[in-house]
Image (cartoon, helix red, strand yellow):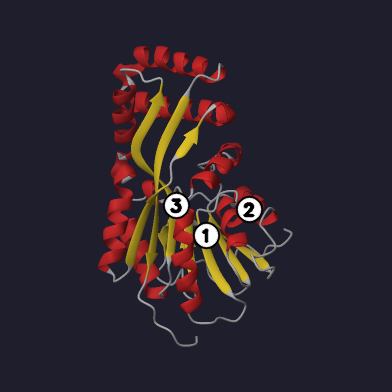
Amino acid sequence: MAGAGPVVPAGERATVRLRDDDPQDAPRYAPEWLQLREPADAAARAADLLDPLRIRLAEGPARAGGLAVHDLGCGTGSMGRWLAPRLDGAQHWILHDRDPYLLHFAAVASPRAAADGSGVTVETRRGDVARLTPDALTGASLVTASALLDVLTREEIENLADACADAGCPALLTLSVAGRVELAPADPLDAEITDAFNAHQRRAGLLGPDAVTVAGEAFAARGATVRVRPSPWRLGPGEAALTGQWLRGWVGAAVEQRPELRDRAERYLDALLAACEAGELRVTVHHTDLLALPRPTGGPV
């Protein structure tokens, strides 16, 4: 795997555990979907959170080999491709995901240089980031994730906040669903579909659109300064492929949650897809980015 270390380095035990017993379980996210959304994600991320992050990283303790960045639920590695070239200094990225194919893709496609030309290296660790072990983030300079918080439970977010606090590292957690969607032209069914989708996001104890609020409270309770910024997708004719896929998933989840919507939702989706294909539909999908900055500790490690 070019540019990547082993999934678990020799002599090192895994720092995340799989949620399921079957190590061959199917990946939760298709790589095609993750690739399709990457440009919209990059455009949406709240770049104004980078300056306070850079300041805190510069104030942090120096570590041999530069910054150690843990990317939780890395998928195809889009966060690393976006963030690594925006930070100065040597970086070593530890990529966590449960799907070995996505880990391979992320490692092979990872950036090789930081903003100042310093080297970027990667290693991969397979496991379910919802099950962080207490020492998972030991030695971390920074923890990152994209579209992760909203698929966690309250307990899992508390565990993540604990792990970051124990490591004394910042956390940049981006693109969590906010529970709000705007479509133009609007339709009377928009609100019902949105409500049903949000209920689907909250199934089985997952936090869905409540995740950023819960995470902010969890990090603040552990002494971190929390900054929250909007990071909406703004989809127009140039993003028709992404919009079409997103619409199918959005409406499909709503119908799964409330089957009584099925007939109306099918007509609604057909109309939206037709408008999308004609270049007449614009969609804003609201997300939120969160930056948690721990109290600086200083001193060499």
Q: Identify the amino acid type marked 2.
A: Ala
Q: Identify the amino acid type marked 3.
A: Thr
Q: Identify the amino acid type marked 1.
A: Asp
Residue 285 versus residue 71 in the image, above or below:
above
Q: Are marks 2 and 1 in contact (CB under 8 Å)?
A: yes
Which residue lies under the disc numbered 2?
106
Label 3 crowd bin: few (<14), some (14–19), many (20+), radius 10 Å = many
Disc number lying in front (3 or 2): 3
Describe the element under mark 1 as helix, strand or loop.
strand
Describe the element under mark 2 as helix, strand or loop.
helix
Q: Identify the residue at horizontal 35%, vertical 18% (top origin).
A: 187
Disc number lying in front (1 or 3): 3
As drawn, is 103 to the left or to the right of 52? right
The answer to which image quadrant residue 135 occupies is: bottom left
Residue 231 rendering spot, x and y as whole percentages: 43, 46
Which residue lies under the disc numbered 3?
174
Describe the element under mark 3 as helix, strand or loop.
strand
